[in-house]
Amino acid sequence: MFKVIEYPKVQDFYSENRAVIYKNRLAHYHLIKYFDELNAGQQSVYQAYNVIDDNGGNVIAVWGDSVYYLYALKWSDDIIDGLLSKIELAKYTKRFTFCGTSKLVIDLFNRSGVEYHVFKERLLYECKSVAPLNKQCNGAAFFSSTDDLETVAEMTYQYGIEEWGEREGRDLNHALNLSYQSILEQSSCHWEWNGQITTIASILDSDTELPIIGSLYTNPFDRRNGYAKCLVHEITRQITTNSDGPCGIVSDASDPITNRMFGEIGFEEVSRYISIQTTRKYLNNDDEKTN
């Protein structure tokens, strides 16, 4: 048997689930960022609820702007039935994304019989202490400065192209503004050799108990020299040493070389995150407001 627990207000849902969400902060990273944007007035939430069963299973479900977040540590077929009683998957088009705990979202779609494709699957890693480097790199890690802005912005833009392709509003000017803000916040880092920047990375949520390394990118002509590994190792070493806490990183599940590198540095997988879309292209008139 399943039970759907609904809340009068989104704030009530958040208060009830906050402890679970932040106990495994990295696993719920994307949901936390969405709620941050919600509090800033940049997003909406239409439904937020839990589906539970008789054996301790509990799913966190949040329906927002063109996205449905679904998270759980434990669930059952009964809970999947409960989710299907709330979510009519066949109504949604490919412009709507279902995200969250990888196996849960896949189980939901497989049970429904609705065709889908995986947009992105991420591995979420955490490191409490770094392993020794088996090979040193030429160069050193630095915080980026405004003198580096043009190079960092171009590399940030190229990172976005490789990761997501061309996206509206994510041109070079956007990368320039983003990089400038990161430099001012001292969250933009790079590896430099012989006066040239080879690799960039950002430190996200540096003011929290779990800083996360993101936007890792090496120029194509500088790859296979270990620069990315050395930069991530140095950033992680400083975070875990200075804060006496862990460091997180998010990786593409389809990139075995990078994932092996993170493991060699000392990162351990804590969760898998997935983004899934249906293959349906068009809406019926009566679906337009919801999907």
Image (spheres, rainbow, N blue to C red):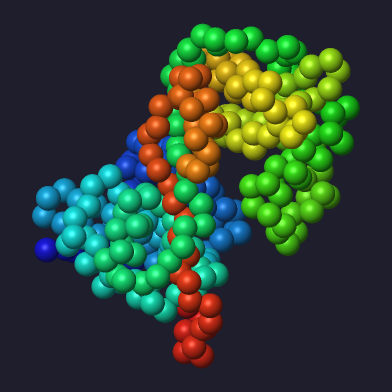
Which of the pair 45/96 is nearer the observer? 96
Report the residue at 48% width, 27% height from top.
Answer: 260
Which of the pair 227/157 is nearer the observer? 227
**Would residue 224 appear left or right of 58 to someone viewing this image?**
right
Which of the pair 68/138 is nearer the observer? 138
Residue 140 in the image: state x and y as whole percent: 73, 13
Residue 250 in the image: state x and y as whole percent: 52, 37
The total of numbered circles placed on residues is: 0
**Would residue 197 appear left or right of 88 to someone viewing this image?**
right
Displayed quadrant of residue 41: bottom right
Residue 213 in the image: state x and y as whole percent: 58, 31
Report the residue at 67% width, 31% height from top.
Answer: 201
Q: Quadrant of the N terminus?
A: bottom left
Report the residue at 17% width, 62% height from top.
Answer: 78
**Would residue 215 appear left or right of 236 to someone viewing this image?**
right
Position of residue 133 relative to residue 47, above or below, is above
Displayed quadrant of residue 62: bottom left
Which of the pair 51/231 is nearer the observer? 231
Residue 72 in the image: state x and y as whole percent: 30, 49
Displayed quadrant of residue 13: bottom left
